[in-house]
Image (tube, grey):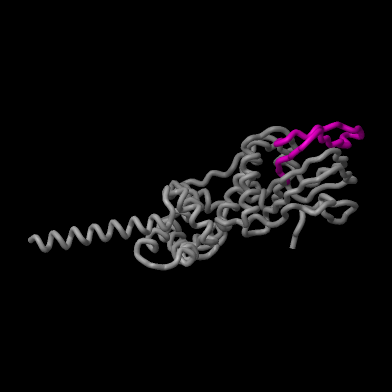
Amino acid sequence: MQNRLEMVVGGRRQAAVPVAPLFAGRVSAGNGFFMESQRVGSFELPDHWIPYYMVGVQFANRKTTRYLLDGGKIREDPIHDGSCEVVVPQEVRRFRFEGDGGFDMVSIEPTVFQEIAGFPQRSPLELVKSWSGYDPVLKDLVLRLRADAAAGFPAGALLAESICIKITEELVSRFSIGKARLPRYKGGLSGIQLRRALEFVDAYLDSNLDAGSIAGVAGLSKYHFGKAFRQSTGMSLHSYVLARRMKRSQELLAKSDLPLAVIAQAAGFSNQSHFTTVFSTRTGISPAAFRNEKRRTSVSWNESQWTDRVGS
């Protein structure tokens, strides 16, 4: 299983950067997306190419420059803090990196890229050209993914998957050669597809749900399913699952004396800390305060009901 970003040198795969990463690992339930965070000093790479698409954010603590061999000539490419880069597969490159900086890079397997793009018949090299510069949208997406990965994916697979898909969609719609368009899905899900999906979510809400498993119940690919689900419900799949987890946790808080850690697990949150953070952010009060408020309201209502009955 892949455990580092890789490049191909002389026909053999090797780690893309010659130092240990801060983070490296898959960032979706499938094998299509991988992320690596690096902080590096000066180094040099020989002629190489990468076997997948990559998009990332670059960092520079001081003057940092990459010297690229481009068309037989050395081209100076200053690295600016917070700038982005998009790289295509099979493009031969050689460069020297001088300075103190780093990057957060996300790789996308060509087969996954093509499936999301909806062009399985076209060569990956026809879709996207290499590019670098400032891009607030890509920067925000990559940094959100890095934060989620650094926290151990507390929201489960769905949030990371949705960010990865959004990154890919941005590449297709904005960095394509020609006029590539993302496929449109008309009509959403059928009634039975939607019912099966919603029932599956409720049945497995306490597990680490992923888009592939839910889409499989509807008989669709997870990329097609996500679009169709939004058309049918007006919500992203991640937003819907989070709403259901909030509702279940509120019901358990109001109707049981279960510990918060048990409620967090039953509602599908990764741990009590994540549950408390999400619950407090979305409701404005902590789970414990919500439970106390519900009990106080219930007691007040029961006392009022008893008084009314006695008075009658």
Compared with residue 62, is residue 277 higher up or lower down, i.e. above or below?
below
307, 152: nearer the viewer? 307
**Residue 272 position within the rendered picture, expressed as x and y whole percent measured from the top left:** 51, 61
**Residue 10 position within the rendered picture, expressed as x and y whole percent measured from the top left:** 90, 52
Residue found 77% across the figure and 43% down from its top? 102
47, 79: nearer the viewer? 79
185, 158: nearer the viewer? 158
Left or right of 84 in this view: 158: left
Seen as rendered, the residue at the extreme right is 72
**Residue 277 position within the rendered picture, expressed as x and y whole percent measured from the top left:** 50, 53
Labels in figure, total: 0
233, 64: nearer the viewer? 64
Which image quarter is the N terminus in? bottom right
Left or right of 203 in this view: 11: right
Left or right of 223 in this view: 206: left
Quadrant of the image occupied by residue 140? top right
Q: Main secondary structure of the magenta part?
A: strand
Residue found 39% across the figure and 55% down from its top? 289
Task: Tell me, yes or no, whether the highlighted magenta stretch contains residue 68.
Answer: yes
**Residue 241 position within the rendered picture, expressed as x and y whole percent measured from the top left:** 47, 56
Task: Tell me, yes or no, whether the highlighted magenta stretch contains residue 208.
Answer: no
Q: Is residue 239 visible?
A: yes
Quadrant of the image occupied by residue 97? top right
Q: Is residue 205 visible?
A: no
Compared with residue 77, is residue 89 higher up or lower down, i.e. above or below?
below
Residue found 39% across the figure and 61% down from its top? 253
Range of the magenta residues?
54-83
Which image quarter is the C terminus in? bottom left
